[in-house]
């Protein structure tokens, strides 16, 4: 968006991942998600993330990832992202390499005000990770927002059996605090498969749903 170019290859890859597995990459591959789960294990008073906040990630996607970069040419979200600060910003400042073209340090005057702001944002999120289940994934992450759209159309799905008694055991194990029986294709589901510990929840695929629909029609 910053250089006004359509990333066809990137969109194709993300679309392929989304259509095949939905948001499963968030549950199995994201290191920042893993960090959130580790910090949440710290014993303290916990706070539930309100449902309405989970829609904020779509605002972040539209405003910080699409609109502002398009209008200003600046990578707005990348400059503020706590995951980027932790995995790239802090190592870059600590390393502060020499520019081979000039022979000078990349950061001759040290980190600026923006880096301090990034550290404050990161510290706030790290504290949030301790008291809430995966808040960055559920409230802020724009990649999660994109992949969440595919959850209702992906080939790999989840299925709740008819004998589900609503015991909420799935919610206890769920890293995004979901009751899977309430909305099996929810965009907040990261397909981590923790809920399949309950015998009423199992992995399915889109063909399974189609076949069941056809059998229902045949009975009618």
Image (tube, grey):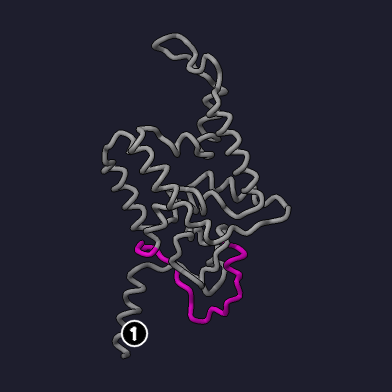
Residue span colored magenta:
152-174
Query: Residue 63: x, y in percent?
Result: 41, 45
Q: Quadrant of the N terminus?
A: top left
Residue 167 is covered by the magenta coloring: yes
Does residue 52 sit above or below 83 in this rendering? below
Does residue 181 sit above or below 70 in this rendering? below
| Label 1 residue SS | helix
Q: Which residue corresponds to the image point at 52% horizontal and 44% vertical from the top-left? A: 31
From this viewpoint, which residue is outermost toward the bottom?
Answer: 220
Does residue 1 sit above or below 131 in this rendering? above
Where is mark 1, residue-wise? 216
From this viewpoint, which residue is outermost toward the front?
Answer: 71
Q: Nearer the viewer, residue 194 or 83?
A: 83
Residue 206 is covered by the magenta coloring: no
Query: Residue 188: x, y in percent?
Result: 48, 59
Q: Residues within 10 Å of mark 1 (few under 14, many from 20)?
A: few
Q: Which residue corresponds to the image point at 58% horizontal and 38% vertical from the top-left? A: 122
Query: Residue 200: x, y in percent?
Result: 52, 74
- Please give the count of numbered marks on the rendered protein: 1
User: Which picture quadrant has residue 210?
Assistant: bottom left
Q: Quadrant of the C terminus?
A: bottom left
Q: Nearer the viewer, residue 102 or 51?
A: 51
Q: Nearer the viewer, residue 54 or 209?
A: 54
Q: Which residue corresponds to the image point at 32% horizontal and 77% vertical from the top-left? A: 211
User: Which picture quadrant has residue 115?
Assistant: top right
Q: Which residue corresponds to the image point at 41% horizontal and 9% vertical from the top-left? A: 102
Query: Residue 82: x, y in percent?
Result: 54, 39
């Amino acid at each position: 968006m910053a250089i006004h170019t359509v990333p066809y290859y990137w969109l194709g890859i993300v679309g392929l991942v989304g259509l095949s597995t939905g948001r499963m990459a968030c549950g199995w591959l994201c290191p920042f998600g893993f960090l959130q789960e580790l910090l949440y294990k710290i014993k303290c008073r916990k706070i539930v993330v309100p449902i309405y906040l989970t829609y904020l990630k779509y605002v972040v996607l539209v405003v910080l990832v699409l609109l502002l970069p398009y209008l200003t040419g600046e990578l707005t979200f990348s400059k503020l992202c706590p995951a980027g600060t932790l995995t790239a910003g802090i190592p870059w400042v600590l390393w502060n390499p020499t520019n081979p073209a000039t022979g000078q340090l990349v950061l001759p005057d040290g980190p600026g005000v923006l880096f301090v702001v990034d550290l404050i944002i990161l510290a706030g999120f790290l504290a949030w990770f301790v008291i809430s289940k995966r808040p960055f994934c559920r409230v802020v992450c724009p990649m999660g927002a994109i992949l969440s759209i595919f959850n209702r159309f992906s080939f790999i799905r989840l299925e709740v059996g008819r004998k589900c008694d609503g015991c909420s055991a799935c919610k206890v194990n769920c890293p995004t605090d979901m009751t899977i029986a309430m909305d099996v294709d929810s965009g907040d589901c990261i397909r981590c498969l923790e809920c399949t510990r309950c015998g009423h929840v199992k992995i399915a695929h889109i063909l399974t749903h189609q076949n069941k629909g056809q059998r229902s029609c045949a009975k009618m």
